[in-house]
Amino acid sequence: MDTASGSPESGGSADSLSLDEALEIAARAHRAGDVPVAEALYGRILAVAPDHAVALHFYGVLHHQTNRPREAVQLIRRSIEIEPEDPSAHINLGNVFFELDRPDLAVKAYNTAILLEPDEIDARNNLGVALRVLRRPEEAEAIYREAIELDPQHRDVWNNLGRLLGSQGRIQEAIACHARALELEPADAGTRRFLVAAYAATREHDRALAILRDWLREEPDNPSAQHLVAAISGENVPARASDRYVTALFDGFASSFDHKLARLDYRAPTLVAAAVDAVHAPRGDLAVLDAGCGTGLCGPALRAHARELDGVDLSERMLDKARQRGCYDRLEAGELTQYLRDRPGAYDVVVSADTLCYFGPLEAFGEAAAGALRPGGHLVFSVEESDGPDFVLHPHGRYSHARAYVERALTEAGFRIESIGSEGLRMERGEAVQGLIVTARKL
């Protein structure tokens, strides 16, 4: 029998382990999040049995989970070549393709899994998400409903159907889906957020607050529930969203962030990059900061201008995605206002796309940005536009800002406004979100 060398650290003895024993220990370590042990054992198994389909598959999944998607594709494809009738391998291959921004290939993989296992629910759930990204909403809705017929107890499918319906402006139908999902798992944080957002969109604030207050009774320190109670009730409104709220929000959907925004016709990074192009030729000679860089959507466009390109963001998981783009010289986790304060005179350009919607007052940010810029440097950013007060926190949890207030705050911070224009930043529940694209120069 083939064997893989064991060790006390890997959960085996000093004696040899059978391949099945080694695989069991590796999989157990993998599930527990012990990446070094799992990776070492998968490697040992494949050194002895390079065509071990299950080890190749699981090792590919591990690569996917540790931000090595291209290697994951190679491993899982090899597993499928050896064992082509394993539907789970096709599902995981589809998941990696989806992360690599190839929803077309993901669709093929999920469809193959369904052919192999006609009652497969997870493949249908993921297929619906990929179809949404490909702007095939009717097909996505049909596949979600098919999955629900097969398994009416599947919370994720109900939520994904609700999000699809909500994006089409079918809010009452979306509410029914999310309410069903909440019945199935009453403590699920994601479902609570989806249902609260849907109730907020229909101005059923009492129902939204009832869900949030139940949530806070169970988790008094939950940053999402705290922030949304303030946003919907108008009580104890913070000057900006807390670091804990922003981190939890973006860590929670870092893996699907770019695809989510693609479904929303997200334009903020493109608009901000175009504003930089309008004031600087792409000579690659500037020190540039992407403040609130997220997954690095601005990175490729900013790279053409940058001698040095830095990024800062609160979410480590978003930064992991930004690193995969290979655009940045430095990426750091931190709060952007303090980051700016700590780097006086460091930059020629500071860019912030769709980040200041989590700030109320902009004075502190403006002063910090002015301090971090060299004389004549540019600040380019987007905010959501308000036609009311200087700034307001909306029930969806983001702030909007009035044009006159933005101009005043920047002028007081030592900037001259070079341009400020109103643009559609993205679609939300079937309606355009209007914003301001601002270019200001430090005096």
Image (spheres, rainbow, N blue to C red):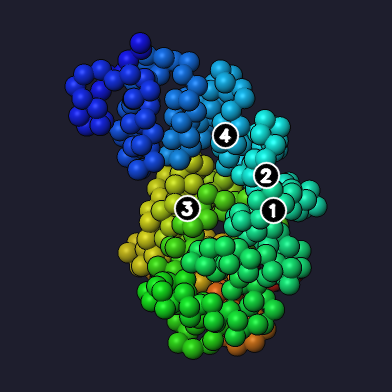
Disc 2 to disc 4, C-alpha distance: 12 Å
> In this rendering, which labeled residue sits more in front, label 2 or label 3?
2
Mark 1 and mark 3 lie on one chain; the one further toward the N terminus is 1
Q: Residues within 10 Å of mark 3 (few under 14, many from 20)?
A: many
Along the line of sight, the residue nearer the viewer: 73 or 382: 73
Mark 2 and mark 1 lie on one chain; the one further toward the N terminus is 2
Q: Amino acid at mark 4?
A: Ser
Image coordinates for residue 440, horizontal then vertical, percent: 56, 69
Helix, strand or loop status at disc 1: helix
Q: Amino acid at mark 1?
A: Ile
Q: Is residue 164 left or right of residue 353?
A: right
Disc 2 to disc 1, C-alpha distance: 10 Å
| Residue 124, numbered label | 2
Image coordinates for residue 22, horizontal then vertical, percent: 33, 25
Q: Which residue is mark 1?
A: 148
Q: Amino acid at mark 2?
A: Arg
Q: Amino acid at mark 3?
A: Met
Q: Which residue is mark 3?
A: 318
Which residue is painted at 63% across and 69% down in the image?
179
Q: Quadrant of the N terminus?
A: top left
Disc 2 to disc 3, C-alpha distance: 27 Å
